[in-house]
Image: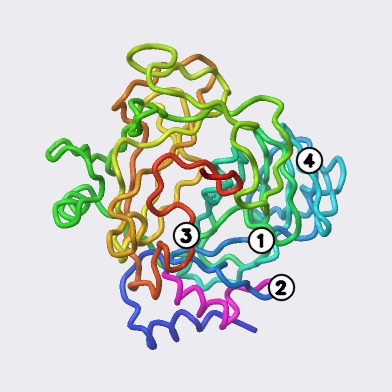
Amino acid sequence: MSGHGSEANLAGQQGMAGTGILPCQAISALWRDGEITAAQPLLDGQIQPSSLDLRLGKVAYRVRASFLPGPGQNMAQKIERFTMHKVDLTQGAVLERGCVYIVPLLERLSLSQRLSAIANPKSSTGRLDVFTRLITDGASEFDRIEAGYNGPLYAEIAPRTFSILARTGVRLNQMRLRRGEHRLTDPELTRLHQETPLVHGKAGQENIAGGIALTVDLQGAGDDGLIGYKARPHAPLIDIENVGHYDPADFWEPIHAGTGTESGLVLNPDDFYILASREAVTVPPEYAAEMVAYDTLVGEFRVHYAGFFDPGFGWAEAGGEGTRAVLEVRSHDVPFLLEHGQTVGRLVYERLTNLPDRIYGQDIGSNYQKQSLALAKQFRRD
């Protein structure tokens, strides 16, 4: 059925006004009214406080190269042109590291002209170094869905470090829906930070310019001086749905303070690292945040594939009291010296259209509230 009246209905029922990211109850309304549809019913937990988890469909296409369809073009034609072979996901299949796959998703959209969307890998996807991007018919950008889009959704999946076992229904990426945009300006962000500390560092040293800066911790908070992990080459296969299953030692080499140089850590080109921010982060319930993934002004490396922070992340009343951001780091082309306290990214905050019915935290089974330096949920935690 047509869903283009759902936004007006929601506004009347819940007082939606202004612009910003839609909260969970608004996403539920879009599902009820048909602006979001799927080949299978939505599952419990699929709607997060400010996003919708997207599920892999029945087949993956191994393609020769990454691509975008371009304006006026559909993905089905491009897939037919560039496919090398087809992989059945219904019983589970291996997606090999170093290969590129296109997977039609179970969900599709029929958005009103005032709704658009953005996407990002889920946290656990990024921490496995699985590069995942959303594509739509006619797209000229990854992870961006134009207002009023009506059509299917596809995921491009490129495992970089580990080969993975995936099957129909697995959730590798997530989507935020927005009505217009209400990203906070630097003055607005400064005022919010003064009211509710967004990063918990030394007072008066906040760096707010196009977002609030995060720096890297290379000293370690524990007695063992653990500051991160480097992925081991030629590691075993990872089944995405095996939670708390794998021994980290089989996949990761721990890194301790002082490794490499006295002042920092030398990143080897194309090795994959898990590090943590020096500051703890808080996202108040009426906001959502996103990490700016890559900035050539701070160095030739990429930080944080999975850039979404839900409302309530690190929020004290949700059991957080400030939670450090885990950083997925990869250097490009040349070795790069990363030093303690160096700026590695910026958090931008955007207002929600309404206070969400639920927020990130223990009550909804969030995996990374109170995290310090956490690997993906597939690995055992002592």
Local secondary structure at mark 3: loop
Q: Amino acid at mark 4?
A: Val
Judge from the rendering whether residue 76 lies leftward or rightward of residue 215; answer left or right: right
**In terms of image quadrants, where is residue 319?**
bottom left
Q: Nearer the viewer, mark 3 or mark 1?
A: 3
Q: Amino acid at mark 2?
A: Gln
> Which residue was labeled with disc 3?
366
Q: Residues within 10 Å of mark 2 (few under 14, many from 20)?
A: few
Q: Could you tell me if the residues under marks 2 and 1 are in contact, i.e. CB atoms within 8 Å?
A: yes
Residues drawn in magenta: 23-40
Q: Earlier in the sequence, mark 1 or mark 4?
A: 1
Q: Residue at x 66, y 56 (%)?
A: 137
Distance from Cα at disc 2 to Cα at disc 3: 24 Å
> Which residue was labeled with disc 1?
55
Q: Residue at x 67, y 46 (%)?
A: 156
Q: Earlier in the sequence, mark 2 or mark 3?
A: 2
Q: Nearer the viewer, mark 2 or mark 4?
A: 2
Q: Earlier in the sequence, mark 3 or mark 4?
A: 4
